[in-house]
Amino acid sequence: MKTPLLAVIAAAACGTATRQGASEHVVAPASYTAADVHFMAGMIAHHAQAVLIAGWAPSRAASAAVRALCERIVVGQRDEIVLMQRWLRDRHETVPEVHSMPGMDHATLMPGMLTVAQLAQLDSSRGPDFDRLFLTFMIQHHQGAITMVNQLFGSQGAGEEEIVYRFASDVYADQTTEIDRMTRMLDVLRRSPM
């Protein structure tokens, strides 16, 4: 009977010692950098353009497969925009306005974003032509987001804060996966008769 009681007392003592030791050696979370702010603000504009063009699919007679992809992009990237806006607001940083992208000049575009001419071309397309252009342009768009993640992680001290690290890592993984999916969809479209 003494052995189980001693084991419980020893376990409780170890747990208390561990908690006390842990509280004495708390490591402060990594602080954020100007590169983190630039990434989060830039990715808001980047995502906003993706949401804009993905939202065109239903009115451009996109295929069911492209419409399903576009719905996932709209829902996922809208949620991520909210996360990025909250992150900036919580740190008293400037939160960029989310507005329609066609008015943006080329100098303010983040990597991979569509130019005004590309937006006009996509906007005027319909059916299989829309599908082909959308997939081509969204692959370019996603590759730009991956470039932005690589630039973030290549900056001294950037991407170390937990939220930024997790978000940027998720963007990299999600958009790499979607590029693979869209490449396969584009290959099928190219092989099918027009």
Image: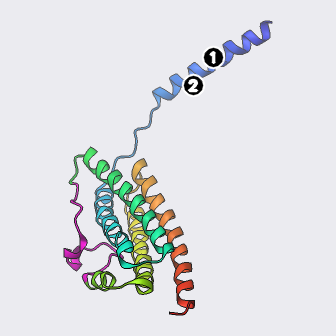
Quadrant of the rendering where the N terminus is positioned:
top right
- Disc 2 crowd rating (10 Å Cα; few below 14, some 14-19, many 20+) is few
Looking at the image, is mark 2 or mark 1 earlier in the sequence? Answer: 1
Q: Nearer the viewer, residue 34 or 113?
A: 113
The amino acid marked with disc number 2 is Thr
Q: Which residue is mark 2?
A: 18
- Residue corresponding to mark 1: 12
Q: Quadrant of residue 11?
A: top right
Residue at the image point whose x is 43% and y is 69% from the top: 70
Picture coordinates of residue 194, whole percent (x, y): 50, 93
Mark 1 belongs to which amino acid? Ala
| Closest to the observer, 153 or 56 | 56
Residue located 42% across and 87% down the image: 129
Confirm whether the magenta stretch covers residue 130: no
Q: Residue 26 location in percent, x, y?
A: 45, 33
The answer to whether one can see residue 161 in this image is: no
Where residue 90 sits, quadrant-wise, is: top left
